[in-house]
Structures are given as structure tokens and as C-alpha cells.
Image (cartoon, grey):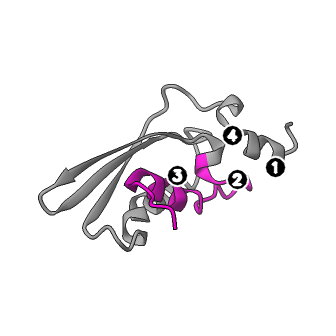
Amino acid sequence: MKFATLKEKIIEKLKDIYDPEIPVNLYDLGLIYSIDCAKETAGSRCVVTMTLTSATCPVSESILEQVRNVGSLIEDEPNLTIDANLVFDPPWSKESMSDEARLHLGML
């Protein structure tokens, strides 16, 4: 099995979180802007800087909670804390989506 970095492991788990209105995961939608990780005394802390498709997203808290819980899903990273940093600048646009997401939504 290929060794995955912590960031790759987080991306893998983020790909399991879907916007309930769009059948594409958060990562391929282009909602994840960056993942920055640092070792701390008691484990690791990562900040996922992300946006939503709309500032008025009715399930924003649910999506953010799922992102924060990703740390508990990575078994070989004890004491991993994920912080979700929600930003709206730059605003999300359809151009942020991966080619796979565009193909899935019939945009390619």
C-alpha cells in the first residue's frame, strides 16, 4: 500500500463529504482551498481553509462539523485536530471544480 501523507489522508476523507444539493464531494467541488498541518506536543493540528457554494448555505454548520470530524476518522493519527476555516474570499465558482466533478455533472 502506498504511504500517504497526512494531507493526502485528509483529502481522502474529505472526498467522502458531499454537498447535499450537489452529488459531488467537497474536494472535487473545489470548496477546499488549502490544508495546512503542524505537529504539536500532543499530536497534530490541521487547518482546512474552505468555502461553500453559497454564503447562505442552509447546511453550512453540518458540513463544517463533518470537516472538523475528519481527524477522528484517520486511525493512525492519534490526537489529530482539524479546524475548519470558512472563508468567502475568493468566492467559489464553477471553474473551481475538478474535471471529474464537471464530467459527473455533465459540464464537460
Amino acid type of disc 2? Val
When the figure is inspected, residue 91 is found, relative to residue 35, above or below; the finding is: above
Of discs 3 and 4, which sits in the foreground? 4
When the figure is inspected, residue 74 is found, relative to residue 31, above or below; the finding is: below
When the figure is inspected, residue 35 is found, relative to residue 63, above or below; the finding is: above
Amino acid type of disc 3? Ser
Q: Are marks 2 and 1 in contact (CB under 8 Å)?
A: yes
**CA separation in Å, label 2 and label 4:** 10 Å
Which residue is identified by label 4?
98
Which residue is identified by label 3?
60
Which residue is identified by label 2?
24
Of discs 2 and 3, which sits in the foreground? 2
**Looking at the picture, how far across and down is residue 78, in whole percent?**
27, 70
Amino acid type of disc 1? His
**CA separation in Å, label 1 and label 3:** 23 Å
Q: How dense is the environment of label 4, judged by Cα within 10 Å: few (below 14), some, or many (20 and up)?
A: some
Q: Is residue 13 magenta?
A: yes
**CA separation in Å, label 2 and label 1:** 8 Å
Pointer 2 or 1: first along the chain: 2
**Looking at the picture, how far across and down is residue 90, in whole percent?**
52, 25
Q: Could one spot residue 64 in this view of the protein?
A: no
Of discs 2 and 4, which sits in the foreground? 4
**CA separation in Å, label 2 and label 3:** 16 Å
Which element type, helix, strand or loop, lies under badge 4? Answer: loop
Pointer 2 or 3: first along the chain: 2
In percent of the image, x 40 and y 69: which residue is there?
Answer: 74
Q: How dense is the environment of label 3, judged by Cα within 10 Å: few (below 14), some, or many (20 and up)?
A: some
Which residue is identified by label 1?
104
Pointer 2 or 4: first along the chain: 2
**Looking at the picture, how far across and down is residue 55, in whole percent?**
55, 38
